[in-house]
Amino acid sequence: MKSSQKTSDWVIGLLITVVFCIFFYTKTGFLETIELKSYDLRMALFASARPSAEIAIVAIDDESVAKLGRWPWPRTRIAEVINKISQAGAKVIGLNILFSEPEEASGLAAIEALEEKFSELGLSEAKGGAAFLIEVERIREGMNRDEKLARAIEASSNVILPIAFDFSSGMRKAKDRKEIPDAIINAAIIGIPASVATASDIIHPIQRLSAAAMDVGHINRFPDTDGVSRFDTAVVSYNERLYLSLPVVVASHFLGLTKEDIRIGPDGELFFKNQILPTTINMQMLLNYYGQPKTFPHYSFYDVLHDKIASAAFKDKIVLIGSTGLGIADVETTPLTPVFPGIERQATAISNILNRDFISKPMWADIFGFGMTLLFGLLTAFLLPRLGAKMGAYIGGGLVGTWTIVILLAYSKYGLWLNLTYPTLVLIFNYIAITSRRYLTVERQKQAVEEESDEANKLLGLTFQGKGMLDLAFEKFKAISVLDDEIKGVLYNLGLDFERKRMAGKAISVYEHIARADKNYKDIAERLKKLSAVTTTGLWQGQKASASGGAGGTAIVDGMEKPTIGRYEIVEELGRGAMGVVYKGIDPTMKREVAIKTVHFDDVDADAIQAVKDRFFREAESAGNLNHPNIVTIYDVGEEADLAYIAMELLKGKTLEKWCKKSNLLPSKTVLKVIGQISEALDYAHRNGIVHRDIKPANIMILSKGEIKITDFGIARIQSSSHTKTGIVMGTPVYMSPEQIAGKKVDGRSDLFSLGVILYELLTGEKPFGGDSVTTIMYQIANAIPLPLKTHKPDVPPLLQSLIDMSLTKRPEDRFQTGKEFADAIRVCLAKMG
Amino acid sequence: MEQGDHVAVDGNTVASVQNMNFKFAAKTDIGKKRKANEDTFCVADDIGLFLVADGMGGHAAGEIASQVAVEVVKLSLTDWLKKGPPNSEIFARAIQLANKAVFEMAVQNRGMKGMGTTLAGILLCNDGFATANVGDSRIYRIRDNAIEQLSKDHSLISQQLSMGLITKEEAKKSAHKNIITRAIGVSEFVEVDTRDEDTIENDFVLICSDGLTSMVEDGDILDTIRRGADNPDNTCEELISLANFNGGDDNITAVLVKFL
């Protein structure tokens, strides 16, 4: 239904569009999850980049834990490894272990207590007391492992330490209570970004370690609602200062940048000197993962500690130290893998920066995605109700397909994340909503009619009876299942009507129908007796009154003198068309059989009748002047009363319709010969100024001896000229040319287009411009390029395609200009086919 | 429906259905060029049904088609509305039944082959009215100083227009003016377009055959109705005179309802 109950289709489409736009704006709900997953899929499809070779990972892995004992280890062991990596010539060392508390040191306290007691007892002045104290000092030094780690960090001078933030709400006034080491405060950068995650608390390495580090960076992660880490949050704010993430800090030092080189631009862009790191409005950087874990070179902590790794592995590189071991690593989920150590996510972020393997989702991409959602939504809301379900599916599918390709290209070529889900889903939802609604409404109406309820049957029966169509009425009444008194009364009246029309047999049937339910209804028993007497005595014999209304044309009644039209004796009726009847007749003077096509003028306005008649005879006569073996011969044109007629050659054969079925196709060569002959005949007619206007398989006959005949020349024109009032319901426009559809003036080239359509159909058994409604077919003829022949029938010789292309092109100027050109082209094809 | 049934409405009739008060009138005229009037209308104020049908098909079949269609819709709605409330769905079902009736008659009777009819009308419902149409007879609503076509023409011309194949100017001159793409009675099932509309005081609804709309511009129809104000009967008369004055090429029918 184009516009139907309660609300119009487009209103529903509009509502769906609005809902999608709200979802888009709020970024909530299952749609967002689908979009995230589709993004993950894109990453999986195009994950081809290689990670930077400048990064190595020293992993506190299961092997190291197995060999070195339970984690946490004494910090001296970390110090030792830092020393070794530093000596190997690493350029930057990133430590992903947060030492926020001093190491547990009960031994140290005991030593200090011992030392104090010793001094208290005045033993320091005793002999050997000084030496004892020096020894104690030495032991204490050895036990202060934090100090050892700090020295190692200081010594290597290129270690970055992690910090972490707490984003739990309720801004504690932590900053007031907490003393934050200067080194941390100095690590912050200047700038006011538009919008950034703001922390309420900080967790940092102990004072001594912080002071020793070259720099610090945060290691917080911000997974999406589905738990997947897709970002590195480059900047967070704490206590009105901005802190960078560990990967950003490590990369900046590796690139030799200072704090002044890192700026936040006026529009919230993150600058590395003068290069922009693409971030979202929340200063987050999309991570372009390289694949499964261990894409970066991994070295076991144990192996490094025991000098099993050549120093070349670390020379001039970024070395990240962190845990990957079971139960001690911080694991995350990435778009590509469910378990991924945090240390590798840091490495991925650094590698993205160094290689510039960025994925970006700038502000405009969001606005663009929103725009496309709105566009697709509105387009479908307003376009779909105007198109059929099939056409809608083609166009919708095309749009979804195109948009998907654009999305994939944008991702793979430019690392752009454009929104796939919202625009495509709004289109699909609209399509489903609008088509299913249309389908349901039509189905419901159909059902209501097809249900053949007693009620409807009674109604229709009464209507038919009222119009004197008693047979039809009886048929309806018979279908009624329950014969109550009311229906019996109705039937009884019908029986009386039949009697009045002296149709005894029918009346008997009606009364018998009532009798089956109620033998004693009124006087039917008596009536039945009387009527059967009538039929046996033959009192009403010879009456063949028909229940139908006055039919037009010359009725042929048995036992009467043979009727005539003009000088022709009518033998029988051959068929009926919209215009009139076709009879088989005999020309008494020549004793030959003719076909007589009659046309009624009683539909034509009185004052126009002469003009219409004149035109009819002009058309018919000029068609009659055609003298060609492949055009049906017109013998005579004439008029009688309000009837005009054309007498023509009587043909015995089959129309081309028979050969258009897929199961009954002619061989390609035969098809070409047939079409060739028709084009020659059309050429002849066109040269004589006659355009057929209605070339279709039903108007072309193959006679029993194989002769081809075109029938009904000029009839189309005669028909349209004689109908001037609300008249004709359009038949199928399958064979019409684009200019006919558009109601423009047509010439012979229009016939050749129609012939092209027939050629296509004869070759493939399919119509080039098909569809389930007049609108669709018209649209196809005006706009669509037909499918290549080989899609329907792979063995069709390819050179025939050019014939089709030429004859079915939209502009008449581009087609074969004359029937002869068409015929010549066919001859060439036939010659090439051998 | 017998001829007598619908000419019985002489002058203005005031009626009330579903708490809606309205005044209405209806006229049909053969026009100046036709030998028969194939238009039929129906004003069933007891159930709030107003219809116009424009029949087609030779040998009086057009008249039969339009009469049967109107009659079946009226009969079935009279029956059904005893059991349920009026709405666009029941309206569409009644029209489907009418389609079936005309189609079966045309199939069974040689002389009626190819007959059919347009159908356009409104059915008053609780909160307004439902429109339904098949073919190129039209339904207009006149509110304040605006005229709005509520029905969609199922004609080749309007198809060509909506597809952008021809311009409005070309449409006026087109030779295909009389070709309709949907009609009651030409196939087993017909798509009926329905709409639900609201109404406010002093709204007019005009249902008419193309004998009026092909002869009189929308603007002139609006002016005539505005001028006619409280007398729908006069207005119908004037509309028909106007169509006849402009040529009267076809049968002219106008049903005008004024909501009070």
Image (cartoon, grey):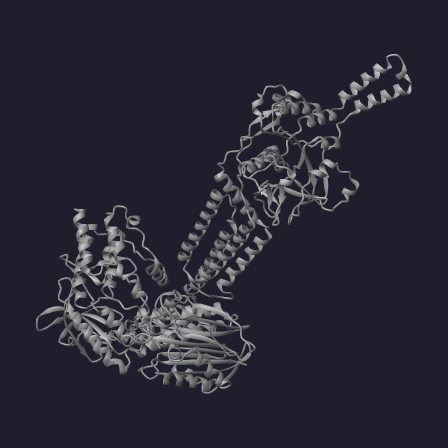
**Most foreground residue, A433 or B43:** A433
- Coordinates of residue B6 in the picture (x, y in percent): 42, 82
* Relative side of A627 to A86, left or right: left
- Coordinates of residue A183 in the picture (x, y in percent): 72, 35
Q: Residue furthest right?
A: A121
- Coordinates of residue B128 in the picture (x, y in percent): 53, 73
The residue at 52%/57% (across/down) is A374
* Relative side of A328 to A338, left or right: right
**Most foreground residue, A541 or B161:** B161
- Indicate whether A376 appears above or below A250: below
- Numbered marks: total: 0
- Coordinates of residue A562 in the picture (x, y in percent): 15, 75
- Indicate whether A433 appears above or below B106: above
**Most foreground residue, B234 or A535:** B234
Q: Residue furthest top?
A: A127
- Quadrant holding the N terminus of chain A: bottom left
**Most foreground residue, A281 or A778:** A281
* Residue A458 visible from this viewpoint: no
Q: Quadrant of residue B134?
A: bottom left
- Indicate whether A673 appears above or below A256: below
The residue at 42%/52% (across/down) is A398
* Residue B222 visible from this viewpoint: yes
Q: Residue furthest left?
A: A590
The residue at 49%/44% (across/down) is A414
